[in-house]
Image: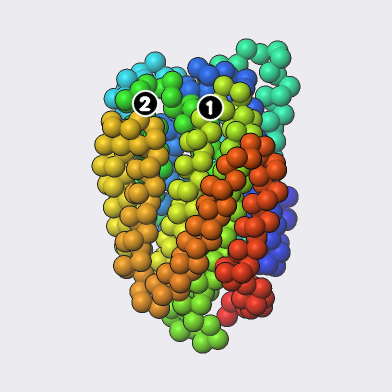
Amino acid sequence: MLRRLNKKLGLGTDISLTVVLQGLGALLAFAVQPILARVLGESGWDTYTLCMQTYVMIGAAVVDFGIVAVALPRIAVAGGFSSPAFQSSFYLRSITFVIGLSVAIILAVVFGDSDLLVPVLIGMGVVIVSGRFTSFRQIPEMIWRVKGRAWVVGAVATLDTMLMVSAVLLLRNIVDFTATSVITLLLLVNIPGFILIAFPVVRAFKRSSTSSKRYHSRYVKGMAYSAMPIAIMAIASQLFGRIEPLVINAVYGKDLVGDYIAAISPLMGTIFIAVSISVGLQPLLSQVHKRARSDVKGEWVMSVGVNVLGGIAISISAISLLFAEEIIGLFGKVYTENAWMLRIYSITNILEFLVILYDQSLIGIDKRREVMTGTLLSLGLALAFQVVGIIYWGIAGILVAKTFSVAGKIVYQMVVIGKSYRVGAINGMIRLTAVAILFAAGYYFTTDITESIFRAVLLLPLLVIILFASRTINFSDLRKLRRLQLT
């Protein structure tokens, strides 16, 4: 394994393998959620989601602090351990972990959940060893990535999830699971993956000539300063994504948090698609922006991105609308009455796909400050809209408020993205709006059909026809995009 660490795959092969493994990992991660909801029961699931998907996730965002985003390019340029960024990342991550742990504990106490401190503490232990969070494991993962072995990172993360699924299925009839025991099990099943990733890197580092070097504190401070904008953006993004459970918990208590998480989890699990496509288009946009190529225009790249990603998002949302009861029923029959939440969130999910695309595009054209500002703006809108929404209209109000806050961020992104990119994005969104309206009309006029499968047989082919007729899905554009190579 140590020898393989120094061998590289071709970039295309590595990316392809990584995307496939990410997709498999995302499917397994989604499968874990309904399994846990069933074995924990309503009360246990409420506690688990509040701890792991709210307090721990926010703490993990603080731990992240943008350290890897700053360190990875430096390590890639230096070719590995010779960069002081590798060691400095450990120092910074130790500091941010203590801060993130403190934030998670303080939030739990402030929101009246001091009885959940033990599972929150164990959950922060999961953050240390898991590949699904941003902590110490990310640092050795950087070496695997710069050595052309990013697929190994994806494979081991998938192995972690497989172990978790297997352990829960094997033990569910033996162990009376509680939220604390499930989080403890999650910690244990991630330790083998942590060792597989970290041990070869640490051993190789100790054998390198740079292991005995010590770097000046100014370098560490410089990295922290460089990471600050990314840190603010990451923390604000995580707060934006987790503000609803906090508000629901503050107003109604944790009993409804699990209901809400169960309703939106199926769509949250599809976000990796938006990230993969957006990150893939980012280098092309960067080259166009810096005039490193003239064979395509920024307007065209943006239009294709919006069409492809929007078409996928609308298709996912259409399936969620048609099969909401069946999908949420995977978590248990008790949750099927909340299918309306999944239907409302399916609209928000389309907008969130576009937000991810525009954020990555702004980063690609060197507008990182605008990305940070947009994230802070959306967080402010979410706080304002959702507090008002939940007071007057309950959970429905918070869902609609989420939609408005995401839409508000898109408006801001269109203002700052630049004229040529804005034209392509708006043209794409006009097509998507037409597709969505036509499908919504079909959905409305088939309400008399009570069987979801019969309704889907009518509407899904109609959606495909609309996507092609509106040229949202355009084979000539897709072929041109496939033939393009990064210069």
Residue 455 at x, y = what percent? Answer: 66, 44
Q: In the rendered image of this protein, does residue 225 appear above or below residue 338?
A: below
Q: Nearer the viewer, residue 236 or 10?
A: 236
Q: Nearer the viewer, residue 248 or 51?
A: 248
Mark 1 or 2: the one toward you: 1
Residue at x 51% of width, y 30% of height: 338
For label 2, the residue is: 249
- Label number found at residue 7: none
Looking at the image, residue 176 sits to the left or right of residue 390; the answer is right
Residue 169 at x, y = what percent? Answer: 71, 24
Residue 377 at x, y = what percent? Answer: 29, 52
Task: Of the two numbered discs 1 and 2 on the same chain, state the one appearing first in sequence.
Answer: 2
Residue 403 at x, y = what percent? Answer: 39, 47
Determine which quarter of the picture holds residue 391. Answer: top left
For label 1, the residue is: 337
| Dot 1 crowding, Cα within 10 Å, few <14, some 14–19, many 20+ | some
Disc 2, SS: helix
Determine which quarter of the picture holds residue 462. Answer: bottom right
**Can residue 59 be seen at all in this image of the molecule?**
no
Residue at x 41% of width, y 52% of height: 66
Determine which quarter of the picture holds residue 371. Answer: bottom left
Disc 1, SS: helix
Q: Nearer the viewer, residue 278 or 99?
A: 278
Residue at x 39% of width, y 35% of height: 396
Q: In the rendered image of this protein, does residue 450 appear above or below residue 371?
A: above
Looking at the image, residue 108 sits to the left or right of residue 280; the answer is left
Three-letter amino acid code at the position of disc 2: Asn
